[in-house]
Image: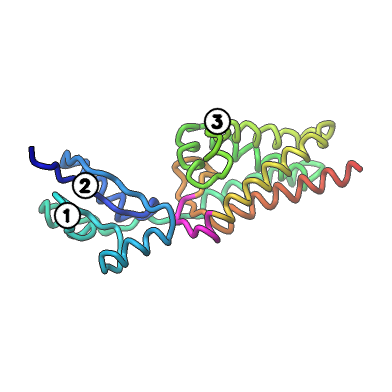
Amino acid sequence: MSEKISNEVFRKESCPWGKKAVKLLDEHGIDFNDHVFNSVKEEEDFKTKWGIDTTPQIFLNGERIGGYSELANHYDAKADHKPEETSYVPVIALFSVALLMAIFTQNIMYSFMGYSLCLLACLKLMDLDSFVEGFKKYDLITKSLPFYGKVYPFAELIAGLGFLAPQYLYITGWLSLFVGITGGVSIFKAVYIDKTDLNCACIGGNSKVPLGAVSFSENAMMAFMGAWVLTAQI
């Protein structure tokens, strides 16, 4: 019996050309193994091994044919070279709306935090499975305890409502401090230590917002407000 030679794609999770390559193979009904790099180091080691400068790289029947453009040429398909752009517009829109809502209330600081967290939680809950799928790629707790990914949006919603209800600020403070610190540590590790290239699940699983400073700032703000509330209660 002859050994079956597999077809393989090696790519970064957020790379638009890798996604296009996977889509093209699916359209042609090709069975393949999809290898997504877990870190920049893993990708660099792969490049060094094969003496190449870019990814994705596609192997058909054990033979490396190159990247997305070469794959399109192989199937005589028209290559789509329009990249999928990342955007901070959803984040700007969300926090702008939350700020406007807060301005018309008595306590702008607490109201802004409350409305922001409630809106963020709402976006996650609109497609919970997609959120969890994106969140577990970088959140340290969800990697060990998968159910935490489904709990997180509800915890965020409770924290948001807590900021809008002064009588529950003590509980809100501890919840925000925990969620903010653990989330911030996860993002810091993923972006600045592991140097992963992922999209942030903060505004939903289908977000095009890159994981980075904005995502870290959101969690830092939660941790700060949690600490602020607890200090004020002393």
Q: Earlier in the sequence, mark 1 or mark 3?
A: 1
Q: Type of residue at label 1?
A: Ala
Please state which amino acid type lies under the numbered disc 3.
Phe
Mark 1 → mark 3, Cα distance in angstroms: 40 Å
Magenta-drawn stretch contains 25: no
Query: Residue sitting at 30 percent across and 68 percent down?
Result: 53
Report the side of 145 relative to 133 (left or right). Answer: right
The image shows residue 208 at horizontal and vertical percentages of: 45, 50
- Residue at 51 percent across and 47 percent down: it is 138
Secondary structure under the numbered disc 3 in the rendered image:
loop
The CA span between labels 2 and 1 is: 8 Å
Residue, disc 3: 147
Question: As drawn, which residue projects farthest toward the left?
Answer: 1
Residue 108, placed above or below residue 118: below
* Residue 72 at least partly seen: yes
Q: Quadrant of the C terminus?
A: top right
Residue bearing the label numbered 1 = 72
**Of tags 1 and 3, which is closer to the observer?**
3
